[in-house]
Amino acid sequence: MSGGVDSSTAAAMLARSGQSVVGLTLQLWDQTRLAGKHGIPDAPKAGRCCSIDDVYDARRVAEHLGIPYYVVNQEERFERDVVRPFVDEYLAGRTPIPCSLCNNHLKFDQLLKTARSIGADRIATGHYAVNEYDPTRDGGRGRWILKRPADLAKDQTYFLFGLTQEQLSRTLFPLGRMTKPEVRTVAREHGLRLAEKPDSQEICFIPGGDYKQFLTAYLEEQGEAMPETAGELVASSGEVIGRHEGISNFTVGQRKGLGVASPSPLYVLNIDPASHRVTVGADAELATKTLHARRLNWISIPALTAPMRVRAKIRHRHEPAWATLEPAGADEVLATFDEPQRAVTPGQSAVFYDGDEVVGGGWIF
Amino acid sequence: MDANATTPLLPEVVEAMRPYWMEVFGNASSIHRQGQEARKAVDHAREALARLFNCREAEVVFNSGGTEGDNTAIFGLLRAGDQLITTSIEHSAVLRAAERVAERGVEVTFVGPRPDGLIDPAEIRRALQPNTRVGDSRRTLISVMLANNETGVLQPVEEIGKIAADAKAFFHIDAVQGAGKVAIDVRRIGCHLMSISAHKLHGPKGVGAMYVRRGTPIDPLLVGGSHERRQRAGTENVSGIVGMGRAVELAMESLEDGTIERLAKLRDRLEAGLLSVEGTKANGVGAPRTANTTNITFDQLEGEALVIALDLKGVAVSGGSACHSGATEPSHVLMAMGLDRHAALASLRFSLLKTATEADVDYVLSVVPQAVERLRALAPA
């Protein structure tokens, strides 16, 4: 329960359906920790999850529903499994997705363990996703399937590709077949005061949304020097056209802040963590036909053994595009798109869909 | 099993308070008869507090509770250039006040405990700085708790009282946890200030009292009306004070009627039963303790999850301290005693109400081992 409309409504639906429900909020990050440093805002703004006000909202919903409610401190694990990797990825010239790591390590791993250890059978979340068991899959052995929800604009399956069969078997997604407006209506029907609360859009541990401020403030707090990654800005021809201050300032597809004057717009094509070279080029050069992904997780199939036609999503805000997926080594796949895709970015995940179903996914490198 | 967090009102306390909600509702400071009746009730309670402390009635100051008392002692006595010697195992009401006065130029020393949870009086003496200047008006305040809330360990306050007297230092005792569990006698101990709280001894929440030795140069925290001889402004919480007075009387009785001995036996049986679970260790056992408390570290699990699991089975305990969101922070007391963060987070405090029964202990012992096993199997830490 994050104090948002989604998880609150999910809790309300389950509690009112007669299930034995306990509400849990994960305390993941102390919002006051870096507040005010390097431009990071002090006061929590609406639109970001998990401040003390959000915990209060979650608690009030639980009180309203008459369910036991606890806040569980997972700050250490969150810092170790989500925040630190986030920082390290940027410093290595990649663009991370903390939300997928949080799902994998905190929400569906640790939370599930905590839930089971206090006597619960399953966890439920307010994610927009559908999971169901199909006994006919995998030659009759059966598999848990993860599918895109009714409201595609809220589809969160991109962040859930890492869920294992065990985790899927113990998770409920009560909102999967509802649209956001329907969820708000149900929230109102249940008498939840936060039915109109705005959705959170930013990364929960970065108030203000500026990841560069966060990196600076965090490294300073840790007593670590920002690694020296200044280097050359080069054109795709290899010609050096300028210098930059550090690779963590860039992400593939970025246009602003390049510090290079040019008659036509330039975009970041590639970041090389070894040489610190950032390659920039024209928009047309941003498109690539292939991507490599590793650290794969398979959902609708046990493993990829032969080429398969899928639609692949390379970032959250991306329309899945047709591609041929094939194994490329132990724990690696190659996806070849029918049409070149813009800004394939190392550090993001690639999630493969077969119709509505999540086939699986991995991390782009 | 969380008496150290708070206690319920005893029926006698409720009955004592009742007339003061609607019938005898006067403001105790009013001159008229309605006020006088309320005043009488407050003074009657004051007598009980004076007996508890063994002090003069004029030395009793009513307030809102233990936090106010701790804050008053520190903020009210110390100015820039003064010295404060306290311990790292105090309640946060003392620690945060100590941090504040440090920012304002008070020299603050936090003495750490031994691994068994006891403060060594010699460490307090060592921390005292000599008053070398002639006619030095610098003040020294020593603040040490009587009983620790996490472990129940009883501190050597009489010895510290002697050290304070020798050094002409002021001595404040946070007796919030100890009052009602052990006898207190401010003259024998030799302290100048003491803070207690009603809700720890079956009185209402939101009311407490201080002992302020006559002549102690303490500035009030709350100013306004001349209540409590100008030591604490604010209309008296008459029904609360009446409730506290009655609760204190009952507490003094239970110190004499075998309650404490009975509680100690129950606690010892509970503790032995918990320690028979594999991978457990008790904290603060070697030192003198209050009769109702046991603090146990459970290896290989997260204390927070165990607290929740036990709650869902109807057993209320506490682990560490609650942070502002309601999640758990590791106990600073246990960490000061030498436990690492991990062990501190795996430690639970069981503290019995004086109404606890053998059946209660039986039930807890039937529930804990299973919960521990399940947690270790499913979510090893």
Image (cartoon, coloured by chain):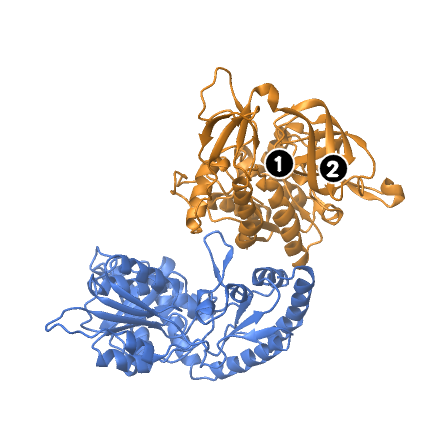
Chain colours: A orange, B blue
Does residue B115 appear anywhere in the picture? yes
Which residue lies under the disc numbered 1? A348
Q: Quadrant of residue B370?
A: bottom right
Residue under the point 32% across and 82% down = B158
On residue A329, the disc is none
Same chain letter for marks 2 and 1: yes
> Chain for mark 1?
A
The one nearer the camera, B41 or A91, is: A91
SS class of the residue under badge 2?
strand
**Residue that sits furthest to the front in the current view:** A239
SS class of the residue under badge 1?
loop
Q: Label 2 amino acid?
A: Val
Quarter occupied by the N terminus of chain A: top right
Q: Quadrant of residue B307?
A: bottom right
Query: Residue B11: where, in percent of width, then height?
Result: 47, 69
> Chain for mark 2?
A
Which marked residue is nearer to the observer: mark 2 or mark 1? 2
Callout 1 crowding tier (Cα within 10 Å): few <14, some 14–19, many ≥20: many
Is A244 positioned to the left or the right of A327 in the image?
left
**Residue that sits furthest to the right in the current view:** A139
On residue A333, the disc is 2
Question: Which label's residue is closer to the chain start, 2 or 1?
Answer: 2
Vertical position of residue B140 compared to residue A9: above or below? below
The one nearer the camera, B339 or B87, is: B339
Callout 2 crowding tier (Cα within 10 Å): few <14, some 14–19, many ≥20: many
Q: Label 1 amino acid?
A: Gln
**Residue that sits furthest to the top in the current view:** A263
The one nearer the camera, A193 or A176, is: A176
Query: Residue A270: where, in percent of width, then height?
Result: 57, 31
Is A17 positioned to the left or the right of B236 in the image?
right
Give how far apart the Cα atoms at labels 2 and 1 are. 15 Å
